[in-house]
Image (tube, rainbow, N blue to C red):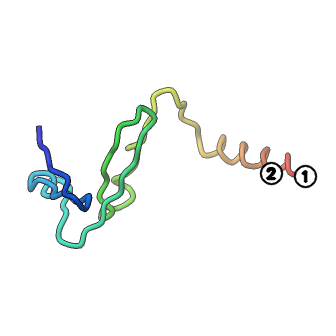
């Protein structure tokens, strides 16, 4: 298990293995997400959006087609009228 120490100013140095895995270099930005279970996840902001597909997958959410999405949007829009 990798670890880091928080300084008095709230900073940490990510272990080299983590920086290498996430392809982080000096000046790279990262994002933190707290998921439904309260776990904190760290994501590099230097990756193509296609690589992020499915990272927040929840098994209880059923997949829908593009047509179903468009239908739901249309129904929602009609509710405003």
Q: Is residue 7 left or right of residue 36?
A: left
The answer to whether marks 1 and 2 mark residues whose Cβ atoms lie closer than 8 Å is yes
Instruction: Indicate the secondary structure of the residue bearing disc 2.
Output: helix
- Count of picture labels: 2
Does residue 21 sit above or below 40 in this rendering?
below
Measuring 72% from the left and 43% from the top, which residue is drawn there?
Answer: 72
Tell me residue 10's x, y (percent).
26, 58
In the rendered image, which residue does mark 2 sit on?
77
Measuring 12% from the left and 57% from the top, which residue is drawn there?
Answer: 20
In the rendered image, which residue does mark 1 sit on?
81
Measuring 77% from the left and 49% from the top, which residue is drawn there?
Answer: 74
Q: Is residue 62 left or right of residue 6?
A: right
Tell me residue 6's x, y (percent).
20, 53
- Residue toward you, 80 or 1: 1
Residue lying at the far top in this picture: please name it. 60
- Residue toward you, 60 or 6: 6
Instruction: Indicate the secondary structure of the residue bearing disc 1.
Output: loop
Measuring 31% from the left and 60% from the top, which residue is drawn there?
Answer: 30
Does residue 80 sit above or below 2 in this rendering?
below
- Residue toward you, 12 or 68: 12
Residue 31 in which image quadrant: bottom left
Does residue 9 sit above or below 70 in this rendering?
below
Residue lying at the far left in this picture: please name it. 16
10 Å crowding of disc 2: few (<14), some (14-19), many (20+): few
- Residue toward you, 41 or 8: 8
Residue 47 in which image quadrant: bottom left
Residue lying at the far bottom in this picture: please name it. 27
Quadrant (top left/top right/bottom left/bottom right) for the N terminus = top left
Tell me residue 50's x, y (percent).
38, 56
Q: What's the CA distance linking mark 1 and mark 2?
A: 7 Å
């Amino acid at each position: 298990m990798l670890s880091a120490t928080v300084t008095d100013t709230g900073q940490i140095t990510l272990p080299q293995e983590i920086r290498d895995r996430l392809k982080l270099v000096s000046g790279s930005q990262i994002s933190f997400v707290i998921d439904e279970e309260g776990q904190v996840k760290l994501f590099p902001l230097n990756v193509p959006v296609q690589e992020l597909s499915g990272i927040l997958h929840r098994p209880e959410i059923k997949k829908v087609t593009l047509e179903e999405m468009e239908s739901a949007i249309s129904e929602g829009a009609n509710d405003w009228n």
